[in-house]
Image (cartoon, grey):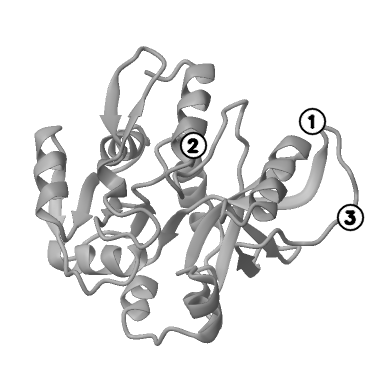
Amino acid sequence: MSVLVVVPARYASSRYPGKPLATLTGATGETKSLVQRSWEAAASVSGVDRVVVATDDDRIETAARAFGAEVVMTSPACANGTERCAEALANLGGGYDLVVNLQGDAPLTPPWFVEDLVEGLREDEAAQVATPVLRCDGTALAGFLEDRRHGRVGGTTAVFTPDRHALYFSKEVIPYTGQTYAADAETPVFHHVGVYAYRPEALARYRSLRTGPLEGLEGLEQLRFLESGIPILCVEVDARGRQFWELNNPQDAPRLERMMAEMGMP
């Protein structure tokens, strides 16, 4: 199966304007932009035919071309990364069996997360979209709850059926659990990792769908698929000792840099 990876990057983020050009310093002291680190994460995935950065901003285009990325310019009207991926695929003329959206704020995404998504869609022909979920341990769950107590939107959580088809995604911590968990204990809460693999027909259809009330309330683009009856496969992934977090807010940068230092990421 031919695979295109798109790194959507927009400058005009409501929560964090200019986020793709924010910098992160790695374990060796090297500083790189968020979009470069995300592009490098995409380029490390095996079995991929092409990696592009999709943006509507000249500043991001210039920065991406400077570090060697191929850039596809898209419309400022794209409301989210999925719409931007759909337009990027159309602008490239199609021709791929799967399109992966590795968002430009997820530079710590391990390559096997994407590889597992591709394998998941190979095995589940009914699924039109696949996305990774990572079971939280007690420490991760405590971090989610701490963010919410302080009014911060941290990561997204997911609930799904026994056959791994998504029921719902939320910026709240779901499902509710009143239990206390040891730091390394498994919990029933799954962190949704903001990476997607789409079949081209699902991606093309997304552009014609209206934003539903749940997507509007949560601000989660994947809910448009669920509200329109398009199944999403949740692929449980193994972090293999790697730490993972997205850059959702400016306050997340020190957290990511600390994780990179602990993992020895340059």
Pick whichever of labels 3 and 2 is earlier in the sequence. Answer: 2
Residue 96 as seen in the image, left or right of residue 192? left
Residue annotated with mark 2: 112
Residue at the disc numbered 1 = 184
Crowding near the residue tagged with mark 2, few <14, some 14–19, many ≥20 C-alpha atoms within 10 Å: some
Q: Give residue 102's mark.
A: none
The foreground one among 95 and 7 is: 7
Helix, strand or loop under label 2: helix
Please name which of the two marks, 1 or 3, marks the residue nearer to the observer: 3
Q: Position of residue 96 (x, y in %)?
A: 27, 59
Name which of mark 1 and mark 3 comes first in the sequence: 3
Q: Mark 1: which secondary structure?
A: loop
Identify which residue is drawn at 39% across, 37% down. Answer: 107
Mark 3: few, some, or many residues within 10 Å (few <14, many ≥20)?
few
- Which mark's residue is nearer the viewer, 3 or 2? 3
Q: How many marks?
A: 3
Q: Upstream in the sequence, badge 2 or badge 1?
A: 2
In the displayed orientation, state which residue is furthest to the right: 179
Label 1 to label 3: alpha-carbon separation: 17 Å
Taking depth in this image into account, of 11 and 198 the one nearest to the observer is 11
Residue type pointed to by label 1 = Asp
Mark 1 touching mark 3, by CB under 8 A? no
Q: Vertical placement of 16 versus 209: above or below?
A: above
The one of 65 and 142 positioned closer to us in this rendering: 142
Disc 3 marks which residue? 178
- In the image, what residue occupies the spot 48% across and 70% down? 219
Q: Give the SS element for disc 3.
A: loop
Q: Amino acid at mark 3?
A: Gly
**Residue extending farthest top:** 28
User: What is the CA distance from the residue labelled 2 to the residue labelled 1?
Assistant: 22 Å
Question: Which amino acid is tagged 2?
Answer: Trp
